[in-house]
Amino acid sequence: MTLFDTQEYRERVRRTQAKMAEIGVDLLLVASPANQFYLTGYDGWSFYTPQMVVVAADEEDPIWVGRAMDAVGAKFTAYLAPERVIPYPDGYVASQQRHPMEFLVEVIKARGWQARHIGVEMDDYYYTARWHEILTTGLPDATFLDAFLAVNWVRMRKSDREIEFLMQAGQIAAAAMQAAMDAARPGVRQCDAMAELYRVTTAGTPEFGGTFTCKPPNAMAGEYCSAPHLSWTEAPLKAEEMFYIELGGCRHRYHAPLARCLYLGRPPQAMADLAKVIAEGLEAVLDAVRPGVACEELEAAWRKVIARHGIAKESRIGYPVGIGYPPTWGELTCSLRQGDKTVLEPNMTFHCIPALWLDDWGLVISESFVVTETGAVTFADFPRKLFSLE
Amino acid sequence: MTLFDTQEYRERVRRTQAKMAEIGVDLLLVASPANQFYLTGYDGWSFYTPQMVVVAADEEDPIWVGRAMDAVGAKFTAYLAPERVIPYPDGYVASQQRHPMEFLVEVIKARGWQARHIGVEMDDYYYTARWHEILTTGLPDATFLDAFLAVNWVRMRKSDREIEFLMQAGQIAAAAMQAAMDAARPGVRQCDAMAELYRVTTAGTPEFGGTFTCKPPNAMAGEYCSAPHLSWTEAPLKAEEMFYIELGGCRHRYHAPLARCLYLGRPPQAMADLAKVIAEGLEAVLDAVRPGVACEELEAAWRKVIARHGIAKESRIGYPVGIGYPPTWGELTCSLRQGDKTVLEPNMTFHCIPALWLDDWGLVISESFVVTETGAVTFADFPRKLFSLE
């Protein structure tokens, strides 16, 4: 029933325990739903009420603590034995009187873990200031340490089965991009073009199904293209405007992002020229990918190309991808940017998105890829160019 | 360009400032993207990097602090004057060296706010333990107070224009449910039925466009129906199994949830009977809705009906809805459950979802509605029954 076999989950737990030893933690509280999914398989849109996966340094399997009605979902998705799924009653949900972290304090005490060196994901989206306050107050004998990103770093090097899911996600991404490109014409409402995109990301391909992505596409037309994270509207697309799409294909929570632009007409020369620079820069990055190369070297390859064309860009050009839960499919560890010394290893996976934002418009061509012994292999197969209706 | 006029935003800010006075706060840090959207109009999928809206007790308009590339989006979506949009450089993003909250500390000091009574949303998804640590350390002269849900409570009573968006969202929800019901047949892959649902939520109606929802539908078939928050798969739907769908229609970030079940055949008598009990209980709740009634009285109306049929249910049966950002479209304030004394007022909006979960399956019929002087008005118009292929 689980996506991966028990051996793979236990290997992930062992690697996490090695990381815990490295940072001096013997009990890890995992608040991130992506990390919970990675370590146990547990999957469900239930993380809007508090839930936690707990990894002890001296136990083979983690425990899952969450809402009673969601403990049922663990039986379908997690590799954990039933006694390692620990439900709290519904009265803890959205209550001003009691908090699920109080329940967790009792679970920790009952297992004799109250004086441990406890690692918590201090800056994770799902580890709130209040959770931390309740835990530190309730467990005064424990030593709390910041273990933010500890599991994220463990996730970076993917298994072959994870890569397989990402390659499938890439196929879905390419099909969805094609559907959006085919639907986008002057006079068509932006939302109707996006509906075709969503139809494909959800249905997937005839061979394997799609699912939801952890975030919507960033899709903007016209002047909205100058802002990278806006959404489409119900306005009709217009001739001679840009339609910018950054989407993700998703397979079993593994995301392959892909971004392209469509110009609804014949692009002005400046745009066509800029697109060529971006494509050239992106190719330079992909050509530079191999194990042993540092993240900053990939960015340098890009910067060298755009500098030759007289362009500078401040923001990073990429990040690792894989499992996505809202609000992001990024893994939050390293970045493709100056100063990042993280060294590429085989089966690491990235989204390189060297967008250029101008005052009135922006342009993007991106690729998601896996690092192999012989270089980058992209998840999607889609032409690297500015599309147009010429 | 903004969804609401400046007067409406300023009215929201004034009501928030009144709430601040009530709880002894003269500077409010708003981390919740839904609350940021409510107070400023700012909308964009940019909240995966830290951003904050700051409301001072003595200033008419808030300030927005966020990533430089996203400051552009404020110009299209927020009512704020350009000088109230304060960008931080990209080097703060996903960095181990510097954190956007350090930048915010400097902004607060530069405005002379460093000794204020600062309200923070201690348990909001987007206010992490680390943010709190940086702010409290960086502003030692300030007094920090928990203002979690302060803005959420202000949001509860909607304006007429907000209700208009919710009514439109309800129309989209009903159309999407119909599309899923039409597509779901034995032999059809679950993901293909869901693709039709997504096509409609994204396209909307011919009169007004759809958009993304802040969470995917919960859609489960067969034995998965016993777990409330799982997702569909690529497996084909089977004859004589249940297909459970809880979806949302969304209009400009305002969500109208709707849940129904389809039995792919002629439902066993026990299911048909249970569906009638749920429908009867739901009608009893809707009949009990009027200003002045407490949330617990709505739950009591439901409990009385199911008790007559020998059924008990522990979990709450509903919550307020409106603006949704991931991971939830719930407003997190009150609940429809025993002991909740919150009193209904006109233009409050709720999702009543009295699902019943059994060991091997679950059943649901839900409605989202607004409280009016004369009772509940539902956002969607969809028959309240168990659907079937008889």
Image (cartoon, coloured by chain):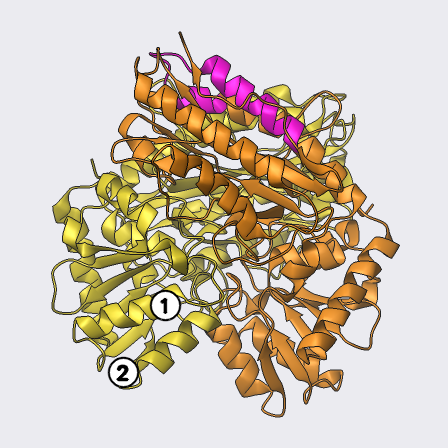
Chain colours: A orange, B yellow
Rendered position, B240 above or below B10: above
Residue A177 sits inside the magenta stretch: yes
Position of the N terminus of chain B, as image quadrant, is top left
Which residue appears farthest toward the top when viewing the image? A390
Tell me, yes or no, whether dots 2 and 1 are on the same chain: yes
Seen at 12% across and 64% down, the residue is B59
Which residue appears farthest toward the bottom when viewing the image? A141
Q: Chain of mark 1?
A: B
Q: Position of residue A213 (x, y in %)?
A: 57, 39
Q: Which one is nearer the viewer's eye here, B100 or B36?
A: B100
| Mark 1 burial class by Cα count in 10 Å: few <14, some 14-19, many 20+ | many
Which residue lies under the disc numbered 1? B101
Rendered position, B186 above or below B167: above
Q: Main secondary structure of the magenta part?
A: helix
Rendered position, A200 above or below A354: above
Position of the C terminus of chain B, as image quadrant, is top right
Residue A254 sits inside the magenta stretch: no
Q: Which one is nearer the viewer's eye here, B383 or B196?
A: B196
Of callouts 2 and 1, the N-terminal one: 1
* Amino acid type, mark 2: Ala
Rendered position, B146 above or below A249: below
Q: Which residues are magenta?
A: A170-195
Seen at 30% across and 16% down, the residue is A268
Dot 2 falls on a residue whose secondary structure is: loop
Which residue lies under the disc numbered 2? B142
Dot 1 falls on a residue whose secondary structure is: helix
**Mark 1 and mark 2 in contact (Cβ < 8 Å)?**
no
Q: Nearer the viewer, mark 2 or mark 1?
A: 1
* Amino acid type, mark 1: Met
